[in-house]
Image (cartoon, rainbow, N blue to C red):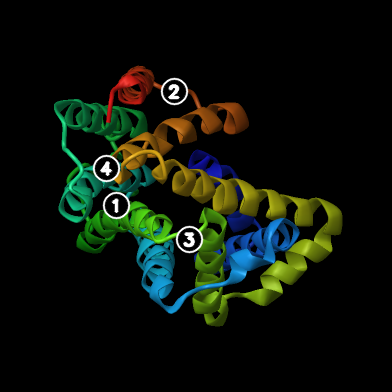
Amino acid sequence: MFGSVGVFVRTLYGAGFNNATVLFARTLLAAGLLLVCILIQSPKLLKLRLQDLPWILGCGILGMLTTNVCFNISSTNLSLAFAAVLLSIAPVYTLVISKLVFGNRITVTKVLCVAMTIAGCILVSGVIGSSSGLSGSGGLMTLSAVGVIAGIISGISYGLYSIFSRKGTDSGLNPITIIFYCMVIISIVLAPFTDYAVIGNYVAAAPAGHSAFLLLHSLCVGVLPYMLITLSIRRLTPGTVTILASCEPVAAMIFGVLFYGEVPTIFSLAGLVITVVALGVLCTAKE
């Protein structure tokens, strides 16, 4: 579902939203949706213990917020393709960290699947076979140190979300509770940097349609993906979950074809096949 982010972000950028405003609108509405679900299901899910705060702050600040901010910086200073590749390396960091934190085994199958997934994402992204693979301005040798560093941090923080989520669920936190408070924290942090006038003008232009679009954006990119990741971590190791969730460039390619008529290259199609095979092998392998 993360792959659909481009569809929403392109539309909102076209309406005058900046990065902080897009993320604020997404997380604030996500928090509202989750609050309604919690109040209907069980208000007790709003309770937090003091010992839960490190996992909530880790998921929200070091996980979600840092991933989104650093990816935005990376994609601004590099091509979207290369930024996506740097983010897709997250499983490497997660496998190592989960080995150190949880003692999870790093199996040959996992290493092979990581390598195949990264290779597939590189092919799908267009870094290979494109004259603008590394920089948006069109030169293969043009690199931004800020962009590369931000991209690497985005991959590490993406992996950290899985680690902190696992620690939170192991301590007894419900996935809904984790996601809700993460969204609240991010909304608070971004509040001073948000352009509220842009949001107001966007909604006023078409109250029903644009409000529904913002809600769908929040649901598809904010609530459901993180909820599914957090639920998966209950049954799988963080490394496995991050590998399964790292096929965002593949999903983005499919959404590009469906919504924008973008024609995939031979490299992109090859990357799609490699990634699907890798994820299939991982799903059928024993932990």
Q: Which residue is mark 1?
A: 155
**Residue at 50% in and 61% down:** 178
- Measured as percent of width and height from the top left, residue 162 is found at 35, 52
* Disc 4 from disc 2: Cα separation: 25 Å
The tag on residue 91 is 4
Q: Amino acid at mark 4?
A: Pro
- Looking at the rendered image, the disc whose residue lies closer to the viewer, 4 or 2, is 4
Q: Quadrant of the C terminus?
A: top left
The tag on residue 173 is 3
* Disc 1 from disc 3: Cα separation: 25 Å
Crowding at dot 1, Cα within 10 Å, few <14 / some 14-19 / many 20+, comes out as many
Does 201 sit left or right of 267 as displayed?
A: right
116 or 135: nearer the viewer? 116
**Residue at 56% in and 54% down:** 222
Q: Amino acid at mark 2?
A: Pro
Crowding at dot 4, Cα within 10 Å, few <14 / some 14-19 / many 20+, comes out as many
**Residue at 36% in and 72% down:** 54
- Measured as percent of width and height from the top left, residue 13 is found at 58, 57
The tag on residue 66 is none
